[in-house]
Amino acid sequence: MTSAWTIVLTHYDESNSYASTVLASTDIDSIPMFTDNGAGEVNSATIILNAVGGKFLTQAPIIDQFDKFRITATDGLGGSYDRVFEVKRIVPAEDNGQGTTAEIHCLGNEWYLQHLHYARPQWFKTAFEVMKDIGDTYNLDPSTTANGGKLPDLSYHDTVYNTSTQLGNGLPKHTLNVYDYGTAPTMMYDVMMDLVDKQAGTVDLGGVLDYFDVGFDTDPSDLHKIYMRCPSSGSDPEAGGGSLVEIDATNGSGSVNTDTDEQEGGIEAQRATRVLSWGEKGTIPVSAAEYIALELDWIFSPEFVVGTIYYVNSILIFQGLHYKCVGQTDGTISTKPVAGVSTLYWVPWSWSDNLGTKQYSPWTVGKKALWEQAGAATDEAAGSRMMWDSNLVINYQDGSTTGTKDFYRTWAHAAVGTDSSGAVFTLSTNYAGNGTNN
């Protein structure tokens, strides 16, 4: 860790309309901790101020409940940190070493999500919609800033995650599921964490076999905002162009510094860890695992090395392109690949060549009609996909306009009768769940 840290601490006085004051370095004894969590933990900071003569405790500027602090820091390697916290606890102390101090314990604005309840069953909704509804419910609370209270407003929970701003709701929109949060009031923060955790499971458990992180950010220009960031936590092996990144906290030359973040996740291959969970006797087709194995082999094909003897069917990368060996080489330069040209030893090898007849999704290729018969909305612009289980037992109204979002006990209620012409007919509830009759 470099010692070239620069920290600016700004105090916002709630009793004076949040007027700001940049504290002098002589006022700051130390800032032993400040976090930037991205894995479901509330951010926190501990600030120790020089309180000689009762400053900050009994003498102006007095630090009190609802005051806020902004910590701006750079680490000397180009990493930056800028976050707003709210005062939660003040601990006066005095000893021979430090004298009189005020230890200020702060939490990020998102801690308010741990103090409001959420209870609402969500039937046949996407994870994105459920997360959005939690945020909308929070913003409707009369205690939020927009409604005249002191609770900060939540933003970006209702927009798709943006990789540039690193803000937004990245939960999936393509799978409809049942998320029953109506059995007992639960803190909104806990519901968010549960919703994110479920995404790692299978579809029948409310997931999509992917991992997500949920964290929060603040905007120093608006002390009363909470910004959501909820991205997929796995890194796609296909993104990033194949270039390697060096992580080095000792110098700033040609490297990526570790910044000041506290992270629990790390970088992982998005699909590699799942291959062994699929097998001949499993519920997922072997062809899907074979496809992913081919994909990983393709991504991690070795680079050509002069002097190496290659055997027939070897696949490697030369000058950014893939080649397949069709004649054993002797390791000399004359047997190396030629860019984009077939030779006695090598032929250009494309992804489709490598894939052969393997399918990316044996569940969907050529099966549009089957999905529609199972209740999937295949004509949706977003490509909605689902598996309808006719054994579901549901009876729910979400409180919206009557007749538009009703979901009844079964997806079809049949009644035999006759119309005016005497013909026998069947009456059933629309499979889309809108309460209309067909």
Image (cartoon, grey):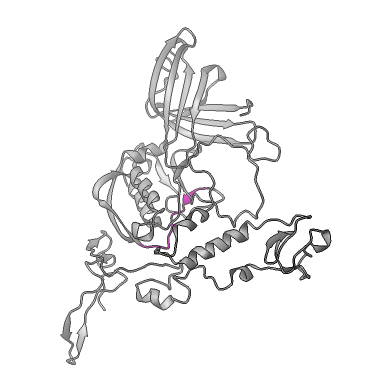
The picture quadrant where one finds residue 148 is top left
The residues colored magenta run 166-176
Question: Farthest residue toward the bottom?
Answer: 421
User: In this orientation, does residue 17 appear?
Assistant: no
268 relative to 204 in the view: left or right:
right
User: In this orientation, does residue 298 appear?
Assistant: yes
Q: Quadrant of the C terminus?
A: bottom left
Is 106 located above or below residue 30 in the figure? below
Q: Position of residue 358 (x, y in %)?
A: 54, 70
Q: Quadrant of the N terminus?
A: top right
Is 256 located above or below residue 88 in the figure? below
Q: Position of residue 60 (x, y in %)?
A: 44, 17
In front of the other: 216 or 353: 353
274 relative to 144 in the view: left or right:
right
Q: Is residue 167 magenta?
A: yes
385 relative to 430 in the view: left or right:
right
Residue at screen point 47% across, 34% down:
84
State the predominant SS element of the stretch in magenta.
Answer: loop
The picture quadrant where one finds residue 349 is bottom right
In front of the other: 102 or 65: 102
Is 266 located above or below residue 45 in the figure? below
The picture quadrant where one finds residue 239 is bottom right
Q: Position of residue 380 (x, y in %)?
A: 43, 70
Q: Position of residue 156 (x, y in %)?
A: 45, 49
In front of the other: 84 or 280: 280
375 relative to 68 in the view: left or right:
left
Residue at screen point 23% across, 61% down:
396
